[in-house]
Amino acid sequence: LLGRLPVVTTQTERSLVLVKPDGFARGLSGEVLRRIEAKGYTLAALAVTTPTREQLAEHYAEHEGKPFYEPLVEFMSSGPVTAVVIEGNRCIEGFRALAGATDPTAALPGTIRGDLGRDWGKKVQENIVHGSDSPESAAREIAIWFPNL
Ligand code: UDP
């Protein structure tokens, strides 16, 4: 029986979550935090900050050169974000499930992007939240946004 259980880990993970400038401006930080806490993850760090282009170049290094890169950096540096480190077993995968698909029009209802997001006809997908996609990304991103953590 044990061999057939889904893969689980007792390793507590951390993930870097950002409420992006669109979500912040719409007053959705509290709603995002509510969903994170309702899911059972805990908050390990929280800050409101307007990202610099330097920070974003590090954060989005993997996307440099792609057509959406410049508009993405422009959008992400346009105003404050709420930066959060969340904690819990498998919270990296868990938060990405809460967030939903990258395209908010296609994101399933029940998810943050599916319930609260839409296509605004802009050059970049304004999709309310960012969440780390792997333990390696999480460690790298947490160091960018919370160097003292
Ligand atoms: N993005 C975009 N167009 C694309 C792909 C990505 O505007 O074709 C933006 C979008 O805001 C997304 C971010 O770039 O959230 C980072 O892309 P990624 O593929 O990492 O998506 P995520 O992990 O945020 O779902």
Image (cartoon, rainbow, N blue to C red):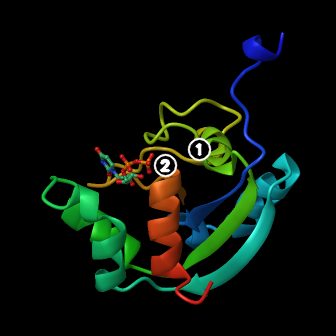
Q: With respect to residue 105, does 5 lie above or below?
A: above
Mark 1 and ligand 1: say if the CB distance to the nearest ligand atom is below 8 Å: yes
Q: With respect to residue 25, does 86 lie above or below?
A: above
The amino acid type of the residue labelled 2 equals: Asp
Q: How many marks?
A: 2
Q: Quadrant of residue 9?
A: top right
Q: Kindly identify which residue carries mark 2.
A: 133
For the N terminus, the quadrant is: top right
Say if mark 1 contacts mark 2, CB within 8 Å. yes
Point out the tag, 1 or 2, that comes first from the N-terminus.
1
Judge whether residue 108 can be spotted in this image.
Answer: yes
Q: Residue at x 51, y 66 (%)?
A: 139
Q: Secondary structure at mark 2?
A: loop
Mark 2 and ligand 1: say if the CB distance to the nearest ligand atom is below 8 Å: yes
Q: Kindly identify which residue carries mark 1.
A: 96
Q: Secondary structure at mark 1?
A: helix
Judge whether residue 20 can be spotted in this image.
Answer: no
Q: Residue at x 52, y 86 (%)?
A: 147
Residue 19 location (% of width, % of height): 58, 66
